Image: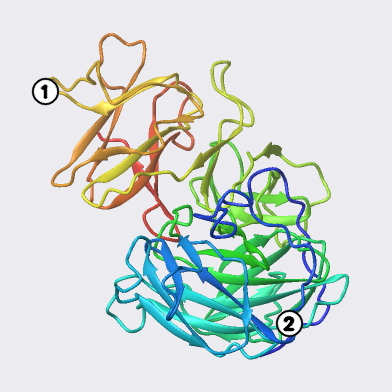
């Protein structure tokens, strides 16, 4: 492992957007309301030792913590994401026992772990793995860490990293997320070692995780105080949505309890749906967001620190340097929140072909589809700038859009409900599109959709490239958000 001293970090200006996702039972185990503040180091008394518990096993119940032989718990109801304060006691080996909250002291413990507790030492017992799992590679277990008791120097903070992700691969750890990997290989249920990584205090920093030489995910860690030590535990499930309570995240623990549970940095996709715009390069300040994005194309996923971004759109040119001229158009994102995924639809005309057609805009959509293994979940996105508000729904027996269609009065630059319309598999569904004020209900255009189970998709309706003004010559840009990375395909309207 390559250790770092005084590395220059990427500093991120944090906004008031809730980077601190609330820990379930966060803070000290007895006081879950407020994350504790670290007020500097406290030395272990020379004849005593200290011990704490970090509950990092997703899906496990709250635990009462016992020391074998004592019928009274030393901590109660330690939920997932919680860290107890250090318990100080006379030196000597102890056996830590964990039982579900409310179980009797005489019942068999879920986990039992002996800890040496030599004089002047400090210990952390981390629970990890899946509660109730029988597979040895993922089963619930304890990880025992001997903590560094020498205070960190002023102006510095120290971090120690544990890979406790239940289904996480072996990862490399890049502090700063700048391509310089400090921990080359951190296997599941292993830690970076007692010799902590030293960083400048007082500045937020990035933690990037890599696998197979490629970026896996990244996090924004708030600034730590001078002379402090922070335990950073990667926990949760890679297979769960990043926004979920058991999603893969970083648990940060200070001396007196959990400081925060940090969700993954937000992920952004950009869809080019502006019919008269050229291929585009997107820049945030001097950083190229996406390059050479043509009409109908979806960018690669880009994970960014949380915050608000001003995007400048330029006609595509070779290279990654920001052009010197003025952008074709500029748009601002909403505040991007940790744990979320976004589809940014660039829609509308740079030069509208007629007065009723809409100008260029950036339509931000958050991935909040309901989990639905049995159905397709569909969101309709109105990005056809030369089309009025529409009603959309399956055609009835007379080949008309029904008055109670599921999507009613959808205006340009808007989308239907975030959870998505459930469409069961087993056949083809024809979706008709009609102006909302049209009493005839005969569709101006329609699309055939073949629902697949456990699928989530944005159906982005756009003007077909080169279509005549007012022609209702629409197409669907079908953005499949079921798996990472998302994909896009183009579907013409039905004959």
- Judging depth in this view, the residue of 290 and 409 nearest the camera is 409
Q: Name the residue under label 2.
A: 149
Q: Residue placed farthest to the right in the image?
A: 154
- Can I make out residue 191 in this image? no
Task: Where is residue 73? Give x, y as percent.
Answer: 46, 68
User: Which residue does the image show at 64% across and 72% down from the upper left?
Assistant: 231
Q: How many labels does the image show?
A: 2
Q: Is residue 283 above or below residue 110?
A: above
The N terminus is located in which quarter?
Answer: bottom right
Q: Residues within 10 Å of mark 1 (few under 14, many from 20)?
A: few
Q: Mark 1 points at which residue?
A: 397
Task: Where is residue 61? Give x, y as percent.
Answer: 37, 62
- Judging depth in this view, the residue of 267 and 347 nearest the camera is 267
Q: How crowded is mark 2: few (under 14 residues within 10 Å), some or many (20 or more)?
A: some
Task: Where is residue 223? Give x, y as percent.
Answer: 76, 60
Q: Which of marks 1 and 2 is in front?
A: 2
User: Which residue does the image show at 54% across and 21% down from the upper left?
Assistant: 357
Structural distance between the alpha carbons of marks 1 and 2: 76 Å
Which quarter of the figure has residue 387?
top left
Q: In this view, does 478 lie above or below 146?
A: above
Give left or right: position of 304 versus 68. Answer: right
Q: Earlier in the sequence, mark 1 or mark 2?
A: 2
Give left or right: position of 421 versus 470. Answer: left
- Can I make out residue 43 in this image? yes
């Amino acid at each position: 492992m390559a250790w770092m001293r005084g590395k220059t970090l990427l500093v991120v200006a944090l906004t008031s957007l809730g980077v601190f996702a609330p820990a379930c039972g966060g803070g000290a185990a007895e006081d879950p309301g407020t994350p504790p503040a670290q007020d500097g180091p406290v030395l272990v008394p020379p004849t005593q030792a200290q011990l704490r518990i970090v509950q990092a096993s997703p899906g496990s119940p709250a635990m009462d913590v016992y020391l074998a032989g004592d019928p009274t718990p030393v901590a109660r109801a330690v939920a997932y994401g919680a860290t107890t304060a250090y318990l100080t006691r006379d030196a000597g080996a102890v056996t830590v026992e964990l039982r579900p909250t409310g179980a009797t002291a005489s019942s068999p413990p879920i986990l039992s772990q002996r800890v040496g507790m030599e004089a002047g030492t400090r210990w952390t017992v981390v629970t990890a793995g899946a509660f109730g799992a029988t597979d040895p590679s993922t089963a619930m277990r304890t990880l025992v860490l001997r903590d560094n008791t020498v205070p960190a120097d002023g102006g510095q903070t120290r971090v120690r990293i544990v890979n406790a992700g239940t289904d996480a691969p072996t990862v490399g750890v890049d502090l700063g997320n700048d391509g310089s990997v400090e921990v080359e290989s951190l296997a599941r249920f292993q830690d970076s070692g007692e010799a902590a990584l030293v960083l400048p205090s007082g500045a937020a920093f990035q933690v990037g995780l890599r696998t197979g030489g490629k970026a896996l995910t990244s996090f924004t860690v708030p600034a730590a105080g001078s002379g402090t030590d922070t335990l950073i535990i990667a926990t949760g499930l890679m297979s769960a949505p990043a926004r979920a309570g058991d999603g893969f995240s970083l648990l940060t623990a200070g001396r007196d309890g959990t400081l925060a549970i940090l969700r993954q940095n937000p992920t952004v996709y950009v869809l080019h749906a502006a019919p008269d715009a050229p291929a585009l390069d997107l820049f945030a300040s001097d950083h190229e967001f996406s390059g050479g994005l043509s009409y109908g194309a979806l960018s690669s996923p880009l994970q960014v620190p949380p915050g608000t971004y001003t995007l400048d759109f330029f006609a595509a040119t070779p290279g990654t340097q920001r052009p010197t001229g003025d952008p074709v158009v500029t748009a601002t994102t909403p505040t991007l929140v940790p744990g979320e995924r976004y589809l940014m639809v660039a829609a509308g005309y740079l030069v509208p072909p007629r007065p009723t057609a809409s100008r260029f805009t950036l339509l931000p959509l958050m991935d909040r589809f309901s989990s639905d293994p049995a159905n397709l979940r569909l969101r309709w996105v109105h990005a056809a700038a030369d089309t009025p508000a529409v009603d959309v729904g399956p055609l009835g027996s007379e080949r008309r859009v029904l008055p109670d269609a599921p999507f009613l009065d959808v205006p340009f630059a808007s989308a239907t409900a975030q959870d998505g319309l459930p469409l069961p598999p087993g056949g083809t569904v024809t979706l008709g599109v009609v102006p909302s004020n049209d009493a005839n209900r005969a569709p101006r255009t329609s699309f055939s959709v073949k629902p697949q189970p456990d699928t989530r998709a944005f159906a982005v309706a756009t003007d077909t490239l080169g279509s005549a003004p007012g022609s209702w010559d629409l197409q669907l840009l079908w953005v499949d958000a079921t798996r990472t990375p998302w994909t896009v395909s183009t579907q013409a309207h039905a004959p």
